[in-house]
Each structure stands twice: as structure tokens, then as C-alpha cells.
Image (cartoon, helix red, strand yellow):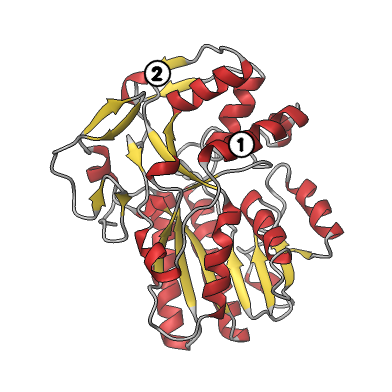
């Protein structure tokens, strides 16, 4: 099978490309990337050594797709993944939509032309912000959790946010661009008869991630703590109790391989894939882990919230467990250890990442 990976020289794209080649599934991997992300050239060299053909192309450019080789499946790992994109003054709203929405349309047109299937990597941030921001929480062991006995919104339990949770706006421009991409992808699938799978991922993390404060938070935090760089808890009282779950992207592979092989309409087209409650932690807990490994480091606090901040985001992946017999295989502490080893071996990683 021939696989085309968009954004192949990013952290997720390169990790999946390596996992695909190691899967013993006789896969041929080609990738495209525009190399605008600092550090992506490092992955280009490593993937080239593995025999991956990498083409300089931008998903925003329709003409860049005209000369790409045919593939049986596309894995879309190209996106601007920051929830603050388009509103933080670093990227414009138009640039965000060009990357995350117009790019999806160009990919779908490629799939239509080549009869290729599509796996769209989406995000937990498609879920509605107001009910998540208003979630009744309490602090337990240094982290927020849903308050026991409190009334919770439909589609949310202590196990996390399920696919049934509201996607009503506001969800951020980033989340809206991904949600719109999901809808358009499913319409293309129904109209032009090719398979589309949408996987809503929690926070993806691991060694080699380009860590920045607004994306790649686990890598950024560990690298910055190790280097004694300034760090700050933002919002929610400035105590760092906000919680996210963590998933290594290589743990996506069993589902991706199963989806590419599957024929028929008996499995859900939209699925949450995340570390879940067992692999979640707060920034305060992450700081405690870093303190134990690298020594104490003072963290500043800023109680003022940012747009679209929420206290607790854990995805419920029980649908994936039922449909694909899937569960995350890399415990969060193992992910942190992997990031820490990489940080110790690469003292200039924050500079390479453009942080």
C-alpha cells in the first residue's frame, strides 16, 4: 500500500512515518512538507535515511498537488495546531484557515482524483468551550477533576469527553477550522465514494516534539524547566491545576492500520483517541515531576485567563476501545521520561524548536 503523509517533517508526521515503516505491513511512504516549522529539516534528513521520499509542497497550494504521486491512503498530519492561532498576533485568521481548512480541501481533491482514502487527524479542541469552561471542578492531588456528584454536561463523565459532547461554537478559530474540515471530509466521502476516518486526538507528546508554550506543552515545559527558563502558570488562579491527557503518536498506529484495511460502514467515522484519565496530569503535577528529576525551579503565576482556556480536558476513548480494541500503550510517565532523555541530549532544543 502506498501512503502519503502530509506534514511529514513535523513531530506527529515523522513519528507516524517511522512507525509505518516499522509496521511490517509492506507500506511505501511518501511525504510532503513546507518546512516552515523550525526543526523540520532535522526530521527530513532522518526520514530520507530510512528511504522516505519527501517532496517540498504546501497543502495550501492546489497546484502543489498536481504532480504528487498517486497514493492509496493519505494521513493528514499538516496543521497549525495552536488553539491561539489567528488571535494571538503571530498568525492571521486567514493564514490559519488557509492551513487548516483550505489545505483540507486540497487534500480532499487529491483523494478524489486518485481514489485515495483519507485519515484526518483532528483535535479535542472541536468540543464546545463554554460548558467546558464552566465545568464544576475541584482540586485533587494538585490537579482539577470534575467535582464528584455535580451535574455534568451531556457527553462528559469522569472518564472524559466523548464524541457525543457538544461541538457548538465558540470553540476557537483553530477548533472551528478542524471541525469544518471534518464536515467537509465526510461530505466528500459520501459524494465521491472514498473512505474517510476522523480521529480526534488529545495532546500528542514525545521525544523530538517541537515544544512551544501554546503547542507541544509537555516538551516545552520539560525542556524549559531543565534549562531554568522562565515558566508561568496562566489562568485559573495561577496555580497550574489545569489538566490535559497525553498520548504518544506511535500509539495511534494500531487504529490507523486497521482503518486503512477496513471495508464497510460498520465502524464509527469519528473517534476520540487519547491518553485518557489514566494518562492525564496538571501543569503543577508536571512541575513536581520535573522538580524531582532536575531539581527545584520556581514557577510564576498569572491568574488572568486566556481566550479558550479550560480547566480540564480529558478525552473518553471508549468508542475506539469498542470499535478497534484500542487503548494507549505508552504510560504518561514513560512519555515524560522519553522527553527528558531527549532534552538532556539536545541542550539547544528550545532554540531549534523556535521557542
Taking the spot 62% from the left edge, 34% from the top edge, the residue there is 337
Between 87 and 119, the one lying in front of the other is: 119
Q: Is residue 66 above or below residue 35?
A: below
| Marker disc for residue 211 | 1
Q: Quadrant of residue 143 in the image? A: top left
Question: Where does label 2 land, which residue?
Answer: 302
Taking the spot 51% from the left edge, 58% from the top edge, the residue there is 100
Between 109 and 140, the one lying in front of the other is: 140
- 1 or 2: tag closer to the N-terminus: 1
Q: Quadrant of the N terminus?
A: bottom right
| Residue 18 rendering spot, x and y as whole percentages | 72, 59
| Residue 185 rendering spot, x and y as whole percentages | 45, 73
Q: Is residue 346 above or below residue 98?
A: above
The span from disc 1 to disc 2 (Cα, nearest Å) is: 21 Å
Q: Quadrant of residue 17 in the image? A: bottom right
Q: Is residue 346 visible?
A: no
| Residue 149 rendering spot, x and y as whole percentages | 14, 38
Taking the spot 59% from the left edge, 59% from the top edge, the residue there is 77
Q: Specify few, some or many for label 2: CA neighbours under 10 Å numbering under 14, 14-19, or 20 or more.
A: some
Taking the spot 68% from the left edge, 37% from the top edge, the residue there is 353
| Marker disc for residue 47 | none
Q: Is residue 4 above or below residue 346?
A: below
Q: Is residue 27 visible?
A: yes
Q: Secondary structure at mark 2?
A: strand
Amino acid at each position: 500500500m502506498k501512503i502519503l503523509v502530509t506534514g511529514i517533517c513535523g513531530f506527529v508526521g515523522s513519528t507516524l512515518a517511522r512507525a509505518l515503516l516499522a509496521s511490517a505491513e509492506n507500506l511505501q511512504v511518501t511525504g510532503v512538507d513546507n518546512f516552515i516549522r523550525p526543526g523540520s529539516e532535522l526530521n527530513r534528513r532522518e526520514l530520507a535515511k530510512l528511504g522516505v521520499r519527501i517532496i517540498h509542497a504546501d497543502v495550501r497550494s492546489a497546484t502543489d498537488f498536481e504532480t504528487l504521486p498517486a497514493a492509496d491512503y493519505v494521513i493528514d498530519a499538516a496543521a497549525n495546531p495552536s488553539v491561539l492561532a489567528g488571535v494571538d498576533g503571530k498568525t492571521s485568521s486567514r493564514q490559519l484557515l488557509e492551513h487548516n481548512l483550505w489545505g483540507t480541501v486540497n487534500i480532499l481533491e487529491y483523494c478524489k482524483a486518485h481514489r485515495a482514502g483519507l485519515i484526518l487527524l483532528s483535535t479535542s479542541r472541536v468540543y464546545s468551550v463554554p460548558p467546558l469552561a464552566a465545568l464544576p471542578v475541584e482540586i485533587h492531588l494538585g490537579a482539577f477533576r470534575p467535582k464528584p456528584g455535580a451535574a455534568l454536561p451531556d457527553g462528559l463523565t469522569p472518564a472524559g469527553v466523548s464524541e457525543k459532547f457538544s461541538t457548538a461554537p465558540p470553540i476557537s478559530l483553530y477548533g472551528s477550522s478542524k471541525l469544518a474540515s471534518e464536515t467537509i471530509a465526510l461530505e466528500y466521502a459520501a459524494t465521491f465514494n472514498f473512505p474517510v476516518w476522523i480521529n480526534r486526538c488529545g495532546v500528542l507528546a514525545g521525544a523530538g516534539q517541537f515544544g512551544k508554550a501554546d503547542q507541544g506543552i509537555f516538551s516545552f515545559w520539560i525542556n524549559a524547566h531543565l534549562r531554568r527558563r522562565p515558566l508561568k502558570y496562566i489562568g485559573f488562579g495561577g496555580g497550574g491545576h489545569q489538566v490535559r491527557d497525553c498520548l504518544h503518536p506511535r500509539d495511534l498506529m494500531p487504529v490507523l492500520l486497521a482503518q486503512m484495511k477496513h471495508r464497510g460502514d460498520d465502524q464509527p467515522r469519528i473517534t476520540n483517541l487519547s491518553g485518557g484519565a489514566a494518562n492525564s496530569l496538571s501543569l503543577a503535577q508536571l512541575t513536581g515531576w520535573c522538580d524531582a528529576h532536575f531539581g527545584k525551579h520556581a514557577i510564576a503565576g498569572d491568574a488572568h485567563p486566556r481566550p479558550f482556556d479550560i480547566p480540564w480536558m480529558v478525552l473518553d476513548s471508549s468508542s475506539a476501545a469498542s470499535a478497534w480494541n484500542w487503548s494507549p500503550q505508552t504510560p504518561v510517565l514513560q512519555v515524560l521520561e522519553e522527553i527528558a532523555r531527549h532534552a538532556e541530549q539536545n541542550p539547544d532544543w528550545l532554540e531549534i524548536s523556535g521557542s
